[in-house]
Image (cartoon, rainbow, N blue to C red):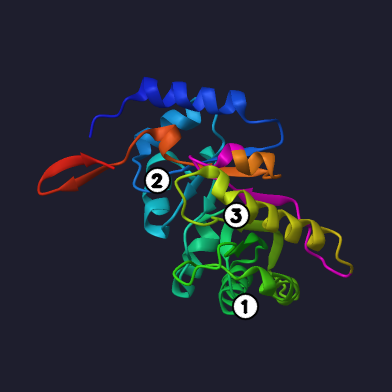
Amino acid sequence: MCVDRAAIAERAREILSVVPPGVTVVAAAKTRTPDEIRVALTAGIRAVGENYVQEAEAAQAALGRSVAQWHLIGHLQRNKAKAAVRLFDLIQTIDSERLGDAVDGASRAIGRITPVLVEVNSAREAQKSGAVPEDIADLVRALDRLEAIRVVGLMTLGPAASDPEALRSAFRETRRLFEALREAPCLRAKMEVLSMGMSDSYRVAIEEGSTMVRIGTTLFGPRQVRSAGQEVET
């Protein structure tokens, strides 16, 4: 695949110029090559989000572990917890006590404390991962009792919608949860990160209080996937 390095670098600089100070841009690198990621990092991006453990392993093998902050932004299977705590600086998608227990155990085994975000299914869509808003406070309190993970915030995708405005209410509800937990007594959790917004919705998410946005297509351009021996844009 031919990588348009100049275009990626220009888009990275443009995104960074419009995102307010204090908002972290995470390069959503699903299916992207190490070369594409390298260009984004050279242009000023400091965090890389991967959906899969295997893709993170390949990217880090090519680029090095220390070139960026590495975030897991896809669903984590419990049997991948051991690899995840080794590869990622932040796991954004904890959505159950069972998954939290797996990450906690894997973290204790290597003597680290792993920062995590709790994923909110703000759209209440059965096909999506994440805990529904009504269960978030109880889940955070349960995770807060574990020794080797630290909840540092919330993450949400919001509903599938072509109009970014349709996500505003979901972002607003997630921010209310975030602020309530930040003021909750007797929690070790420090609610510092509110991860909301992607390529089509990050501007609305920032208006609603997001401190972290996950941007893929707007940064890298359309994905190239192979179909019947040819590369096709998506």
Callout 2: few (<14), some (14-19), or many (20+) C-alpha neighbours within 10 Å? Answer: many
Q: Which residues are magenta?
A: 186-203
**Quarter in which the C terminus is drawn:** top left
Choose top left, top right, bottom left or bottom right for residue 107. bottom right
Dot 1 amino acid type? Glu
Residue 183: image tag: none
| 190 in magenta | yes
Mark 1–mark 3 CB contact (< 8 Å): no
Against 83, residue 62 (above or below) is: above
Which element type, helix, strand or loop, lies under badge 2? helix
Q: Position of residue 72 (x, y in %)?
A: 51, 55
Mark 3 or mark 2: name the one nearer the start of the chain. Answer: 2
Residue placed furthest toward the bottom: 98
Query: Would you call the spot at circle 3 few (<14 residues within 10 Å), some (14-19), or many (20 or more)?
Result: many
Which residue is drawn at the image coordinates 53% and 43% (left, top)? 164
Residue found 63% across the figure and 71% down from its top:
108
x and y, in percent, of residue 174 in the image = 68, 57
- Classify the position of the N terminus by image quarter: top left
Depth check, front residue: 80 or 13:
13
Amino acid type assigned to the residue bearing label 3 in the image: Leu
Q: Which residue is mark 2?
A: 59
Furthest-left residue in this view: 228
Q: Which residue is identified by label 3? A: 90
- The kind of residue tagged 2 is Ala
Which comes sooner in the sequence, label 1 or label 2? 2
Q: Main secondary structure of the magenta part?
A: loop
| Rendered position, 134 above or below 27 | below
Q: CA distance from mark 3 to mark 2?
A: 16 Å
Q: Residues within 10 Å of mark 1 (few under 14, many from 20)?
A: some
Residue to which mark 1 is pinned: 97
- Identified at 59% across, 36% down, the residue is 203
